[in-house]
Amino acid sequence: MSDLDAARRRSLAYFDSTHCASQWNDVLRFLLEELYASGGEQDAGAFLRHIGARMASELTLPDQQTLEGLERTLNELWRERDWGWVSLTDGETRLTIEHGAYPVAGHSEAERARGARAASALLAGAYGVWLERQGGDSSVPLRVVTAEAGKPLEFIYAREEVAGH
């Protein structure tokens, strides 16, 4: 079984146990459409990262001594907000963050693709702040690796020289 199949099963199990309110779908879809049209991909992404960082600053996490504890705490936070699940994997020189079952506004394939990019920017801002507050190095970048609708978002927290493998 592939990692994507396992992630899809986990996402389906998450959706089976929760519900998602749809009243904001059109508002968020229009907001993202205008944000990307007005600011372009780079500025819209930077703005959403800023919003994610602000969100993380407001939603403080208790200090965690282990990666498992951090993952558990993050999953509790996301479950309370109906924002999916997260998996943290410690590699030798990197931390991989996988976030699935995140909300995506839109109906068309293009709208959902934009929604996935927006969610990845927002979450990159949040995870960057949380990692730094858990003792991470602020000079180590958090990069978006995968931001495709229907797939878990993937982030790598690693120095430049090891981020590309």
Image (cartoon, rainbow, N blue to C red):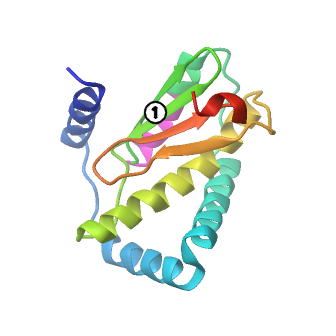
Residue 149, image x and y in percent?
32, 54
Would you identify the image quadrant in which residue 32 lies? Answer: bottom left
* 119 on left or right of 48: left
Q: Is residue 121 left or right of residue 64?
A: left
The image quarter in which residue 112 lies: bottom left
Is residue 70 toward the left or the right of residue 26 in the image?
Answer: right
In the picture of the structure, the residue carrying the numbered disc 1 is 75
Asked whether residue 75 is drawn in magenta, I would say: yes
Q: Which residues are magenta?
A: 72-82
Tell me, yes or no, whether the highlighted magenta stretch contains residue 155.
no
Residue 162 lies, with reference to residue 50, above or below; the image says above
Query: Can residue 146 be seen at all in this image of the molecule?
Result: yes
Residue at point 46%, 79% (across, down): 31
Q: Give the residue type that dot 1 points to.
A: Asn
Residue for point 47% across, 56% down = 119
x, y percent for residue 91: 57, 17
Q: Secondary structure at mark 1?
A: helix
Disc 1 packing (10 Å; few <14; some 14–19; many ≥20): some
Q: Quadrant of residue 13?
A: top left
Horizontal and vertical percent for residue 38? 55, 85
Magenta stretch, main secondary structure, is helix
Query: Residue at the spot x=24%, y=24% of the render?
Result: 2
